[in-house]
Amino acid sequence: IMSLLKHYFSLNSKHFQLKKKIEKAYSHSESDEEISKLKKLKLRIKDDKDRIKKALLNLISRGKLKGMKISEIKKVLKG
């Protein structure tokens, strides 16, 4: 479970970095191909984040996270 959370945070960071790269690419008139490539990667990362989020919420609903602060995990996943 902790590895899922770490992976989620890692993907969240990558997603944010890609968002900034895309903004920079637009401001520097990068090629449409490069921007499209970055957007596709960002979408894949978002899909991975959503998949992990769903798995974690499923574990929470099934009571599999005993001993963890579930309210904190839920708060993180909402962001």
Image (cartoon, grey):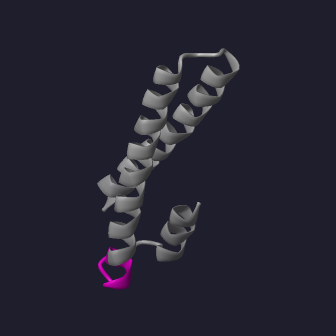
Could you tell me which residue is drawn at 42 percent across and 37 percent down?
40
Residue 35 in view, yes or no: yes
Could you tell me which residue is drawn at 43 percent across and 42 percent down?
10
Counting the numbered discs, the total is: 0
Residue 65 in view, yes or no: no
The prevailing secondary structure element of the residues shown in magenta is loop
- Of all residues, the one furthest to the front in this rendering is 32
Foreground of the two, 73 or 58: 58
Q: Quadrant of the C terminus?
A: bottom right
* Residue 60 painted magenta: yes
* Residue 33 painted magenta: no
Classify 31 as above or below 54.
above
Classify 41 as above or below 53.
above
Measuring from the top left, give residue 13's x and y in whole percent. 50, 40
Classify 2 as above or below 59.
above
Could you tell me which residue is drawn at 47 percent across and 75 percent down?
70
Place residue 57 in its image quadrant.
bottom left
Measuring from the top left, give residue 59's x and y in whole percent. 32, 75
Q: Which residues are magenta?
A: 59-67
Place residue 26 in its image quadrant.
top right
Q: Quadrant of the N terminus?
A: bottom left
Measuring from the top left, give residue 23's x and y in whole percent. 65, 29
Foreground of the two, 59 or 54: 54
